[in-house]
Image (cartoon, rainbow, N blue to C red):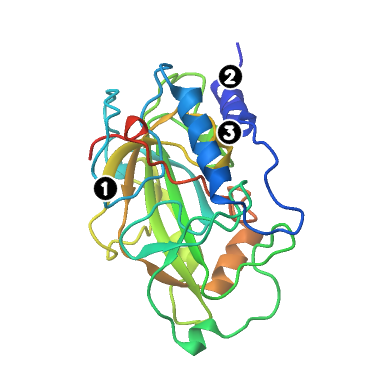
Amino acid sequence: MKSMAAMAGIISMSASLAVYANDNGAAVADSVIEQQNQKLLENTAGKGFGPQSPRDLSNPLGENTRQFSLAPQYEQLNLCNIHFHKNAEHKGGEFTVYAGNGDGHGNHTGFLYDGELAASQLAPITGNICPTNNESLMPGDTIEVHYVFSSAQINPGPTLGACLNDNTMNPQLRVEGQVLVLVNDRSALDFNELAAIGERNGYHQALNIPTDTGTPIQYAGSTTGPAYNENGSPLLVSWSVRPNVAFVDIETVGEWCNDNVFEETQAHGVRNLVTHPSLLSPM
């Protein structure tokens, strides 16, 4: 039998996607997103999948009542991974502007900060920040940071595999979500500090998760990412997503991408917003 860590790698990478992107890079049609959503329904129907993520945080309705115990608060769990997505995966709070359908693979989609920024915050920068597919993060971009915690006895590290071990076959998982806006402002928050890790009360912890961005919205869901646009995520996750954004110095995000224990070098893609009631938990 494969180890839990190996299984996690398979889980995170195995969900296949058809090729939808146009050759010219234009966003796919609404019909493509509808097709993906329909395939997600077909591939999860009657198979016992738990509630899925991401979701519209303003909509409390859901019909997926698969029961699982919510994970303890993150202070009683071990931090296992930190990563971020380009654009917010969740919709709600101060991030409600739809970025568009994107390419069908999780790029150029999701949700954006719905406020205004000063011209100085949007001033161009030199160099590339966490580049992927020849694209750099830019001032004004929105990202959603996921602080992932596990009840397993693990050490922080790369990928979801760091959250699992062979001695705990059913660890409880929690994700603390924080949406950030990247700005050209050296007085803004330092991402290296937001992602600082250490031990506290015997647990591996993210030491500086923001506490001033609103009361977290909590719900039962799953892991995310565009690999699950057409397939259900099998892992059960307790979510806490803060409704207000924080502003972070874009240069410090680049510094973190160049050197972190999680081997994160770029933003992850965005899973389509899950909207069908049968795939959502009641909040």
Looking at the picture, how far across and down is residue 166, in whole percent? 51, 19
Asked if the residue under mark 2 is in contact with the one under mark 1, i.e. CB atoms within 8 Å, the reply is: no
**Which amino acid lies under the numbered mark 2 shown in the image of this protein?**
Ser
- Say which residue appears at 37% left-offset and 45% top-offset: 55
**Which amino acid lies under the numbered mark 1 shown in the image of this protein?**
Asn
Q: Residues within 10 Å of mark 3 (few under 14, many from 20)?
A: some
Q: Would residue 115 appear left or right of 80 to someone viewing this image?
A: left
Asked if the residue under mark 1 is in contact with the one under mark 3, i.e. CB atoms within 8 Å, the reply is: no
| 27, above or below 222, in the image | below
Looking at the picture, how far across and down is residue 113, in whole percent? 41, 68
Looking at the picture, how far across and down is residue 161, in whole percent? 56, 32
| 26, above or below 36, in the image | below
Residue located beneath label 1 in the image = 59
The numbered disc on residue 119 is none
**Which amino acid lies under the numbered mark 3 shown in the image of this protein?**
Ser
Closer-to-camera residue (188/144): 144
In this view, the mark in front (1 or 2) = 1
- Say which residue appears at 37% left-offset and 55% top-offset: 91
Q: Residue furthest top?
A: 1
Dot 2: element: loop
- Say which residue appears at 51% left-offset and 24% top-offset: 43
